[in-house]
Every structure is written in C-alpha cells, then in structure tokens.
Amino acid sequence: MTERKFNADSTPVLALGYRFQWEPAQDCHVLLYPEGMVKLNGPAAEILKRISEKKQTVGELIAELKAAFNGADLDDDVYQFLEEAHDNDWIRAE
Amino acid sequence: MTTTGSEQNKAPGSTGGQMGLNAHNNIRQPLWLLAELTYACPLQCPYCSNPMDFANIKSELTTEEWINVFKQARAMGATQLGLSGGEPLARPDIIELIQEARNLGFYTNLITSGVGLDASKAQAFKDAGLDHIQVSFQSSSEDLNNLIAGTDAFQHKIEMAKAVKAAGYPMVLCFVTHRQNIDQIDEILDLAISLDADYVELATTQYYGWAMHNRDQLLPMKEQLVRAEAIAHRYQEEQKGNMKIYYVVPDYYEERPKACMNGWGNVFLTVTPDGTALPCHAARELPGMELPNVRDLSIKEIWNDSNDFNRFRGYDWMPEPCRSCDEKEKDFGGCRCQAFMLTGDPAKTDPVCSKSPDHHLVLEAIERGREEAAKPAQEAKPLVFRNPKNSKEICGL
C-alpha cells in the first residue's frame, strides 16, 4: 500500500454514485454502482452500513464497532479495509 | 473480525461476486433489466441499434405494465435498471417510473440524449431517486463541428451536461464513434475536459439495426483506430484522477469476439416498448425467435422456460470451433446477432473470431468500408437516418 488515505480524524463517505443496500435475492448486503454490484461479506457490510448511514470520523466509527462487537481489537482491520475500499473507488475521505 | 476474504484476486470485503460485464453469473438471474420505454426519439442517428422496423411497433406498455415488469424482475434479483429507448424522456410518466423503480430497490440508470431535459427535470429526477444519468452526444462530424464551435444547436446539450452535474450526479458522457467522427477524438476529449466531465465513454458503433444498414459508411479504418487509440491513451494518462476515459476497440478489429451480453440468457433481460422480452436488445431481428411478451407470460416463465432464452444458453448449442475452444467460457462464442447478420446463421461462431471459418466476412466488410471511404463524396452511399419514414420504406410497412 502506498500512502494512507485515512486517519482517526478523517471522515469516510461513499463515493458519488455508490449505494449500499440489503439484497434479498443475494442474501447479503451489496454496493451498487453504475452497471455493477459488489456482494459484501459481514464485516465489510458492518463498516459500509455505518459509513452510508451517517457522517462520522474513523475514530468514531471504530468506537461504534467496538461497542457493537464486545470491544474487539479491530483497528487494523478497519484501516486496512478503508484503504482497500478507497483503492476500489467505493469510498473517499472527507 | 476480518474484513478481507480468504480467496485471492477478489475485492476486499466482497464475497467474490462482482457483477460487472466481466463476471460470470452461476445462478443465472436477470441481474440487468434494460427497459426500452419507447421507440419515440427526436433524433435520427444513423448508428442507432433499434430495429429497422421500429415504426411498426406501436402499442407501448402502460405505466402500470412497466411497474409490473419492474416488480417481477426485481423479485428475481435484478438490481440494475437501464431506462432507455428511443429517448426515454419522451415518456410522460418517466418520473413516476423512476420513483417506482427506485422504491423497489433498483439502481436506476437513465440513458438519454439530453433532448427534452432541463435543469428542473434533472432536479426532479434526483428527487425521484434516480441514481445515474448518462448523456450521449450525437457526434456526426458535422454536428461535432458545430458542437466544438459552440453553436446554439449544441449549447443546449452542454447546458444539460452541466445541469446533470449541478443536480449532484457524476457527469457521464457517451460519444458514439465511427469513421466520420473518430478523427476528432481529441476535440471530443477536449470538450469533455472543458465540461469537467467525470467519465467519458468513447463507445464504438455496434453494427446492429440502423448501424448495420449504414455500416459501409460508418466502419472506421485501421489507421484511424491506431491514431484514436494513441490519443485516448494519452488523455487517459493526462487525466488520471480527474476524468475516467473508457475506450473500446470496435470488435471488427479484434481477434476474439466480445462476451456479448455476458452470455445469452445469463444476466441480461431487455424489454422492448411493446413488451417483447429479449436476451439482448438486437435479438428481435434473429430468425426463429418466438418473441415472448410480458403481457402474456410472467418474467419468470420467460426467463426460465422460453425457447428464446434457452436457445443459446450455456455451451451445448455451440458449433466448432467454439465447442472445443478453451476460451468459450470467456466469450461465450461471441454475439448471436452478429453471427446471423454476417453469416445468415445465428448458431455459428461469431465471425469476429479469427478461428471462425467465416472470419473473411469481417475482413471483407472492413475492405468495403475502405472502398466507400475512398470514393468522392457524390458517389458515396448516403447515410440512412433512423426515422419512421425510412423505417416504413425499408421494411415495406
């Protein structure tokens, strides 16, 4: 990975034209974008759901996830996912 | 908690199921619904892929019938909806259709020429939940010159492209390229830059319908493509991070066919203005089609059981050289409509493939285009424009 796009104070938002939703026919959450769809696994969905629902910093997002998942140590995983999601043009940093 | 999957070569956090034009769908659901809402169109583009006999097709689905189609396709797992035509803005119920589709959970794409669009409509579409607008520019060389010169005729289009962006959409411009405008690709891209476009698709003319009829006048020459490709790549480099440029080589110049529709009856479902369900928007012209209609049958029955949708599904229908080819899962034997138009038999290997015994037909078409291009203007075959009068005359309606 080259330079990091996210720190605790940055705010991740869905990229323009991307939509997050539950997809009954796929039995999973998905990201929809022009002419495409990505099926998401559980952890990715937990992060993107929060990003799509409200604007908050990465620090706040991680705190919320920790509260929801019994204080699990997930900082590195979240940062790694955010960087990769950014590289895929799914999200951008504000 | 891990956020990346265990398999390699897939997007982080995805379950491996990317639905794009390059992915294969194992379950076979109509993921993509193309709703050709109307054949009415204020334009007369000679490269239109609508069927030649469109003037004969009169009875458009009602608002309720379209909504019923949306509901059925959505229940079967469709996520992408293309609202197309003709010109979809010619439907007076376009906003209602967008709203219903969006409420059903579709990702809604409007594919428009921009004619009939204004700033307040763009905002109304946004309010109705429209996800995406693609504005196509009709760039015949004459029009394009006007456009570049900034004459009034095209001022409206430019205004519309800006209005789309002002309404909060990415600006997605589509230019259909052919022999008569491809040499102006740098002007086209400069125009896109000046408009602050986000995406530019340099779409090559697909030779179906009206475009096939006009192919000798439209097919670009090799040297034009070499030049255009070099320019497109240069702009791609220069615009990295600003504007994404998609450039596709016309398949007549490829060695392998395109994976048309990502496989017949695999992910794409087209419903035409009169309710005919097709595995691709050009398939109406194939011989032996039964043309099931959504007025008579459910989408489920049509998708799963109709002869049309099963006709070229999978690999069993394939002739040689496809049948034993190790690339058949990549291109599905190419395009059935192209095979029919060039060879007269839709079940043959797409002649674009250099392994096809009919590949010479593609080379001959290229040669004919070159001969036409060399003729003085007064001897060249005139372009036939897509309008109801020509449709009736040519099809003897």
Image (cartoon, rainbow, N blue to C red):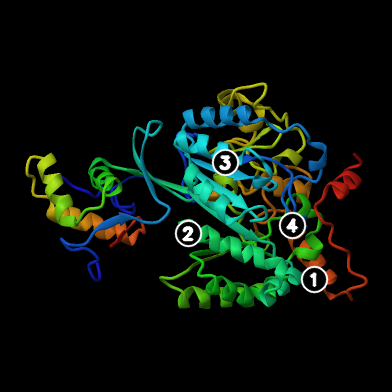
Residue under pointer 2: B170
Q: Where is residue B355 in the image (x, y as percent from the top left)?
A: 65, 56
Q: Residue at x 89, y 69 (%)?
A: B380
Quadrant containing the N terminus of chain B is top left
Amino acid residing under circle 1: Arg
Q: In this view, does B10 lie above or below B39?
A: below
Foreground tag (4 vs 1): 4
Q: Helix, strand or loop at disc 3? A: helix
Residue under pointer 1: B370
Do the numbered discs 1 and 2 sit on residues whose CB atoms are within 8 Å?
no
Q: In this view, does B257 lie above or below B63?
A: below
Is residue B179 something that shows in the picture?
Answer: no
| Quadrant of res A57 | bottom left
Please, which chain is the residue tagged with disc 2 on? B
Query: Whole-Å distance between the Cαs marked 1 and 3?
Result: 45 Å
Q: Is residue B243 above or below residue A56?
A: below
Let me know if marks 1 and 2 both belong to one chain.
Answer: yes
Q: Helix, strand or loop at disc 4? A: loop
What label does residue B95 carry, if any?
3
Q: Quick one: label 2 or label 4, which is nearer the N terminus?
A: 4
